[in-house]
Image: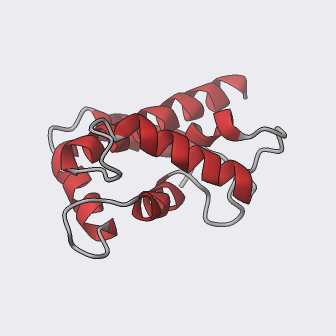
Amino acid sequence: MGEKLRLRVLKKLLNNPELERLSDQVFEAHDEDADHHLTQEEVTSVIRDSIMSEEDEELEGLGQDFDADKSGRLDKQEFEKAVTTLFGQFDTDKNGFLDKGEFFKFYKHVIESQVAYLENKINKQ
């Protein structure tokens, strides 16, 4: 999908009243043990599916802050730090899991970060 088209799709998604329902579907798809909480490992799966390019783990917005060597990619250590930090920010009750409410805020943040990244990238072209 082209960057401009992807940006339009993500902006529509952010303004869609069905975003919470979609977030619930993503939550349930990654809740591997069906315990209604996402572990850090399960959130890692969401991040890989939502942020990282499938081909080469190129950064798309959210991970840029964790790219210590500015390579445009996250190595294993950088990725683990990103996951730990993001998980901690959204695990507001600090129980070691994200419930559906916490996950919705996380998921919306991921989309907003991707929109900002794509807008910046397109504007630089």
Note whether residue 8 is visible.
no
User: How many numbered marks, from 0 up?
Assistant: 0
Residue under the image location 41 percent in, 64 percent down: 42
x then y, percent, for residue 90: 36, 38
Would you identify the image quadrant in which residue 66 lies?
top right
For the rendered model, the colour scheme is: secondary structure
Q: Is residue 35 above or below residue 62?
A: below
Residue 112 relative to residue 91: left or right? right
Q: Quick one: which residue is furthest to the front in this view?
A: 95
x then y, percent, for residue 95: 30, 48
x then y, percent, for residue 14: 30, 35
Residue 75 relative to residue 104: left or right? right
- Viewer-side residue, 67 vs 25: 67
Residue 40 relative to residue 28: left or right? right
Residue under the image location 71 percent in, 59 percent down: 76
Residue under the image location 32 percent in, 59 percent down: 38
Q: Is residue 107 above or below residue 49?
A: above
x then y, percent, for residue 24: 20, 55
- Viewer-side residue, 65 vs 40: 40
Residue under the image location 66 percent in, 31 percent down: 121
Note whether residue 113 is visible.
yes
Q: Quadrant of the C terminus?
A: top right
